[in-house]
Image (spheres, rainbow, N blue to C red):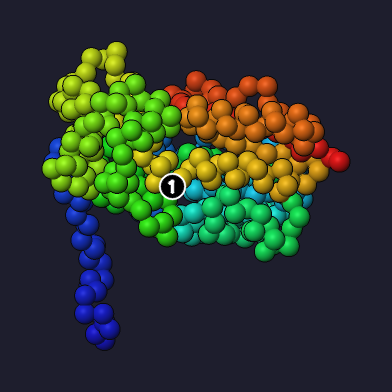
Amino acid sequence: MMSENPNAMPSGVPAPRRRRARYSGTHPQRFEQRYKELDSANFPGVHQHVRAQGRTPAGTHVPVMVDEVLAALRPQPGDVVADCTLGFGGHALALARRVGAGGRLIGLDVDAVELKRAAARLAAAFEDDARESAGPALGRPAMSFHHSHFAGLGKVLAREKLEGVDVLLADLGVSSMQIDDPRRGFSYKSDGPLDMRMDERLRRTAADVLAEISLEELTAHLTDLADEPDAAAIARGIVRRRAVGTITRTAHLVDVVFAAKGLTRRQWRHRPAEQQGDLHPAARTFQALRMLVNDELAGLAQFLRIAPHCLRPGGRIGVISFHSGEDGRVAEAFRAGQAAGVYTEIAEAAIRPAPAEVAGNSRSRSALLRWAVRGVA
């Protein structure tokens, strides 16, 4: 009998091997070329191999300071927890496993694409737990997900008919999935459209911001948002470059930064061994521009204002920041809350990742965790 599939291979004949993505050299460099990392189901063990090298597999994200977050926020069985920046769901999964079947997880993210992926990943993780336990879903809490900025947490809780949560977490960093995908325009490592919108509902891209912002404003933002020592030179370079043509690609912006710092790409690639761990020359510029595009400081200010009112009595909040400006605002809000009697306890100092974590995940090196406890009255 003839096969219904005309392309089917005869019985006993092995299927042809899939050709790997073509790229120059011995290792893939661009995001889309890392086909094994992007298809880990068909290449088991590849993620572990990449992580052992201290890198993050393409299309994934490694959450920072998970153990420290759990120790600071102390989620208990039956608690209601809210992860306000869901990302890839790494922190959320750890929290959800602690609160168990009697608990509840509420996840928020402004990135609709990553929100959907994270929701699927969390569901799959608990299905795996159930299979490994040879029983029903092991401690799976009720879970709901919302396409929302963390500053909109109050509205989300109202929709959920909740007056507050027991544990509240916000990670202010950008996820590795966003950074690594050149189509999102967050990274100085790969060329792509200069976009940087975390929420695609936003109208202005990074290219739009650079086309409109004044020299004075740009200089101030590079200094205030990223501690960029060459802020004035970079701002002048951007203004000169846009007079010739709009800066629409990440590679264009990197070239401007290199020129402002008196460097070439070749000099950076062949820098001395003792400088190999230095921050990329364009890192601070990209950080400041991303924060401008997404109005991150205004969102953080609103979140810090409403956060105490979103916690149940005795509830705990944790905020992970990656920049001194953000951390300073979090610390100030927690201190003010403690002085007003809203918080009964706050972190005495920011918690930093352990050296072993930084060695295994270089993106964690600038992370700062602060926590506070809501009063019971």
Q: Quadrant of the N terminus?
A: bottom left
Give me the residue at 24% from left, 63% from top.
Answer: 15
* Residue lying farthest to the bottom in this orientation: 1
Q: Position of residue 73 (x, y in %)?
A: 69, 36
Give me the residue at 29% from left, 13% from top.
Answer: 274
**Amino acid carrying mark 1 in the image:** Asn
Q: Answer yes or no: is residue 333 visible.
A: yes
Q: Quadrant of the C terminus?
A: top right
Identify the residue position indicated by label 1 in the image: 294
Whether residue 314 sits left or right of residue 328 in the image: it is right
Q: Position of residue 333 (x, y in %)?
A: 65, 33
Q: Nearer the viewer, residue 276 or 230?
A: 230
Q: Which corner quadrant of the image does residue 347 belong to?
A: top right
Q: Determine whether 321 is above or below 137 in the image.
A: above
Give me the residue at 64% from left, 58% from top.
Answer: 156
Q: Position of residue 67 (x, y in %)?
A: 61, 32
Q: Which corner quadrant of the image does residue 242 belong to?
A: top left
**Disc 1 on helix, strand or loop?**
loop
